[in-house]
Image (spheres, rainbow, N blue to C red):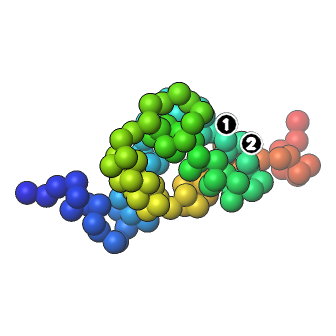
Amino acid sequence: MKTLCDECRKEAEYNGWTNFATWGAKLIMDNDSGLWDLVRDLAREHRDNSADLQDALRSLTEELCGLEDGLGVPRPSLMAAQLLGAALCEVNWREIAESLLQDLADEEPEEDNGEGATS
């Protein structure tokens, strides 16, 4: 029987992402509407600096997990904090940031360069 730990131990890509941790973090960001709004706002705020967006995404995730203060989430036990911290180290924040920034770029209407259709 395949377990979650078997998936976590894979060093290869997972569903097109660097690894299981990266895929899982992005999956939750994409599927929780309140979190999605926060993440999109961060992407817009840091659209010109991928490194800052990466840091902001990691900080937000640490707050949501109770590892950092800010959102009023209860602190996990020492054991849970250690394991959460280790899992978060596996997330490829750069890959997630670049994906979000690409999504923003894809949504922006192309600027009219004065060529094309005339009225």
Whether residue 23 is visible, yes or no, is no
Q: In the image, what residue occupies the spot 56% across and 30% down?
A: 71
Residue 58 position in % (x across, y down): 56, 50
Q: What element carries label 1?
A: helix
Depth check, front residue: 76 or 114: 76
In the figure, is residue 26 to the left or right of 39? left
Q: In the image, what residue occupies the spot 22% across and 54% down?
A: 4
The numbered disc on residue 45 is 2
Residues packed near mark 2 inside 10 Å, few (<14), some (14 to 19) or many (20 plus): few
Q: Are marks 1 and 2 in contact (CB under 8 Å)?
A: yes
Residue 78 position in % (x across, y down): 37, 46
Q: What's the amino acid at mark 2? A: Glu
The numbered disc on residue 41 is 1
Q: What's the amino acid at mark 1? A: Asp
Q: In the image, what residue occupies the spot 85% across and 46% down?
A: 112
- The quarter in which the N terminus is drawn is bottom left
- Dividing the picture into quarters, in which one does residue 109 lie? top right
